[in-house]
Amino acid sequence: MALDVDAVGFLFPGQGAQNVGMGKWLCDTYPVAEQLFRQAGEVLGYDLAELCFEGPAERLNATKYSQPALFVTSMAAVEVLRQEQPELVAKARCAAGLSLGEYTAVCFAGGLSFENALKLVQRRGEAMQDAADQVDSGMASVLGLQLDVLEQVCESVRQGDEVLQPANLLCPGNIAVSGHLSAIGRLEAAAKEAGASRVVPLAVAGAFHTVLMQPAVAQLREALSETPPTDMPMAVYSNVDATAHRDGSDVLQLLAEQVVSPVRWEDSIRQMMADGIEGFLEIGTGRVLQGTIKRIERRFPMDGFGDGAA
């Protein structure tokens, strides 16, 4: 692993990064990862390892399953790193996660125990699935437009009380929008007319990070209220405000707000750079987050670990 810097930001992927086979290499190679998956299955009440390793993809992609799967896979990779490369983990100065990945970041930073974090993630996934089932909604990635132009496009295609808005502000030229499927259906033509290169529907259950997820907030707040806040020795950069937080109560409050707030990922990455981070390590499955960093600051040092990465 070539990340020859002293101050590293640990990054954790969110929903959409899941794939059948995720975590298998970790568990086949390291007993500490296998034990964590076994513990997770006991907490969740189903065989998470079997679902991750064998699928089926339709079940793994369901929100209530993909979120625990991604969390556990990333935490398994963290435990392997602690065992195999403690000197790299010691270089971690802060953490951040994309949407669901923020729970992993908080757990890694010491704000939640593994079991408490997993229970919260399970409740979050179920609540968001329930909210998504109430309305025909979804997300799409728009490539090639700046935020202000995309906001104008969304406004131009909305009709009546439809919701359509930027939701994941990932990196220059790559922003995901969320809203009613009826509005998303009119988005592609308008976005391309405004200069977008592509509009790609995303395989998610609903309009995450918009007001359409409001029904999930009450369930999530109830679960968070049952979780004791713990101040963190390491800062986590919140999706909501793109700033560093260590106070446990603040972090739990922001996790509730996050479900209905746009994800300020690019701002978070830029702020970590400004605060002295010299390189990033993406932990878990996929390499989506490294792709966003390349668009933000192409030559910035980065690497990944998980699912066979070394």
Image (tube, rainbow, N blue to C red):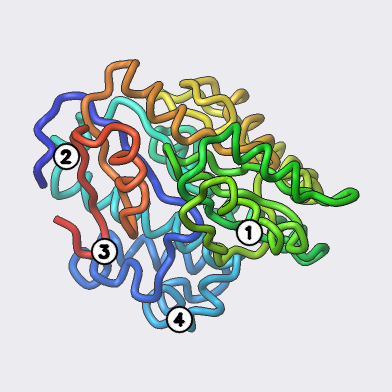
Label 3 environment density (alpha carbons within 10 Å; few <14, some 14–19, many ≥20): many
Residue visible at 34% across and 17% down in the picture: 274
Give above or below for 174 relative to 49: above
Residue 189: name its quadrant. bottom right
Asked whether the residues under the numbered discs 2 and 1 touch, taking CB atoms below 8 Å apart as contact, a structural biologist would say: no
Q: Nearer the viewer, mark 2 or mark 3?
A: 3
* SS for callout 4: loop
Q: Position of residue 50 (x, y in %)?
A: 42, 79
Say whether disc 2 or disc 1 marks the residue closer to the N-terminus: 2
Determine which of the numbered discs, if any, sits on residue 189 in the image.
1
Q: Amino acid at mark 3?
A: Asp
- Foreground pick, 245 / 200: 200
Say whether disc 2 or disc 4 marks the residue closer to the N-terminus: 4
Q: Nearer the viewer, mark 3 or mark 1?
A: 1
For residue 40, side relative to residue 161 (left or right): left
Q: Amino acid at mark 4?
A: Gly
Determine which of the numbered discs, if any, sits on residue 55 in the image.
4
Q: Position of residue 119 (x, y in %)?
A: 59, 53
- Foreground pick, 6 / 180: 180
Residue occupying the far top of the picture: 275
Q: CA distance from mark 3 to mark 1?
A: 38 Å
- Foreground pick, 170 / 172: 172
Q: Which residue is mark 3?
A: 307
Q: Which residue is mark 2?
A: 86
Label 1 environment density (alpha carbons within 10 Å; few <14, some 14–19, many ≥20): some
Q: Position of residue 34 (x, y in %)?
A: 31, 67
On the rendered image, what quadrant is the C terminus found in?
A: bottom left
